[in-house]
Structure formats: C-alpha cells, structure tokens
Amino acid sequence: MAITDLTLTQWLLGITGAILMGLGKGGLPGLGNLSIWFYAAAFGAKPSVGILLIVLIFGDAVATFAYRKHADFRLVWKLMPPSIVGVFIGFFLFDRIPADIFGRVIGIMLLLMTGLHFFRQWLLRNKTNDHDPIPHKGWFIGSTGVLAGIATMLANAAGPIASFYLMAMRLPKLAFIGTAAWFFLLINVFKIPFQAAANNLDLSTLKISACFGAFAVIGGLIAPRIVKLIPQKYYSAIVWTLIIVAALSMLV
C-alpha cells in the first residue's frame, strides 16, 4: 500500500484515529481504543496493527515529554519483563489466531479483572489501612504483563489492561498518565522488529504512519490542557468506566 493510493475515506479515518490516539496517550483514557476501530475500518484488521504502531509511538513520545516528571519507573520496570514475554507469545500467535476472536477473550478477562478490583475495594472498605497487597504480588504483575504483551502485539489493544494494573496500584492522575506513557513507548518500540518480521510493517507503511503520526502529536499536545480540568475523583471514575466500555466493545 502506497501513500498515494489512500482514498479520502482512509485519510479521514486515519487522521481522526490519530488525533484520538494522541488525546488518549496524553491522558484521556479510552480514546486510544476508538482509534483501533478507525484504523481497522480504514486499512483492514491485520494491516492496521502495523500502520497504527508507529502512530502510537508518536503519541507515546509526546506523552512521555509532557509528563516526564510524573512517571513511576519502578512500576514500568516491573511490568516490562512479563510484557516482553507476552510480545513473543503474540508474535507466535499473530498468524494463527484472528485478532477479533482474541479481542473477545481480552474483553471477558478485562470484565473479570474489573469485577475483582471492585470486590477487593468492597472487602477493604472498613479497613483503616487501605493498602491492598494483591497488585504487588508477582503473579498479578506477571499475568497482567503477559496479557498486555499479547494484546499489544496482536491488536495494539493493551491500553485497558495496563490501565487496570496502574489503577489497581492507585497512582495519582498525573503519575498514572506518565507511567503508562513510558511503559507503552518502550513496549511499542520493542514491537517494531516483530511487526516487520510478521510482514506487517515496511517502508511504505512507515511513510503512511509518519503522516498520521503528526496528527497524533497534535492530539498529545492538546490533551494535557484538558486533563488539568478533570478532578482526581472524576478521573478515576472515567478510567474505570472506559475500561468497562472498552471490554464490552471487544465482545461485540
């Protein structure tokens, strides 16, 4: 696919999806999941994964700069090793499991994990020390990281899973955004040779991605101004609501 072959519809869907991705990377959770739909509609499910990957990296770069003072790198380094394992598994499955079917599996698991989160919150409601040890357990970090790695390799769809992990760690709003930005920048750059090896990323798709990536930068620059207007208590509610919506959307 050459950039000169793109139709007007593909340009409109690609630009809109890129702006939404930039807004999502800049701290407006859930919008990034909408961009997955836009790119799949514009370029087809499998090719869209490679094209969107570079757009994601553009958005990640802006987000890491905007929130560079707020990232918790301890959580990034804990989540990276199992996520890398997940990328290897996703690479093996890339041509073997349709992304839409795997998306339904991810949606079900997200709903189960969200239910588990609120159940833990209910159990902790009368405790004076609200520290929850479960998110710090190795099995929790490992399973979440592997699942995120698989989902991001197959469909760039690890956003809700990473959000689940970071929200369970009860990070403040800005730390949540900054930590997520650095995690996804590192894991997305790591994915580049795997997408190339899967014949889903080449020079022509890189040119297309770079054009759309400029619009992701615009979205990423606008997003922090909007984030400042959202109070912490409402922000948490928005994140969890959009995680549920994203999970349900994967089941459709």
Image (cartoon, grey):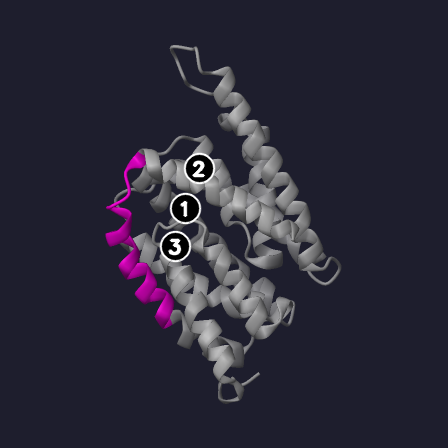
Between disc 3 and disc 2, whose residue precedes?
A: 3
Which residue is disc 1 drawn over?
Answer: 180
Q: CA distance from mark 1 to mark 3?
A: 8 Å
Amino acid type shown at disc 3: Lys
Q: Quadrant of residue 16?
A: bottom left
Which residue is disc 2 drawn over?
Answer: 166
Out of 95 and 192, give the one closest to the viewer: 95
Which residue is disc 3 drawn over?
Answer: 25
Between disc 1 and disc 3, whose residue precedes?
A: 3
Amino acid type shown at disc 1: Ala
Few, some or many C-alpha atoms within 10 Å of disc 3 (few <14, some 14-19, many ≥20)? Answer: many
Find numbered disc 2 in the image and state the secondary structure of the residue it sits on. helix
Vertical side of 116 occupied by 152: above or below: below
Q: CA distance from mark 2 to mark 1?
A: 8 Å
Q: Check whether the beta carbons of the residues at disc 2 and disc 1 lie within 8 A of each other.
A: yes
Few, some or many C-alpha atoms within 10 Å of disc 2 (few <14, some 14-19, many ≥20)? Answer: many
Out of 88 and 230, give the one closest to the viewer: 230
Is 191 a magenta residue? Answer: no
Amino acid type shown at disc 2: Leu
- The residue mark sitting in front, 1 or 3, is 3
At 59% from the left and 47% from the top, the residue drawn is 248
Is 226 a magenta residue? Answer: yes
**What is the magenta segment's predominant secondary structure?**
helix
Few, some or many C-alpha atoms within 10 Å of disc 1 (few <14, some 14-19, many ≥20)? Answer: many
Vertical side of 247 occupied by 188: above or below: below
Please provide percent x and percent y for residue 195.
59, 65
Magenta region, residue range:
214-232
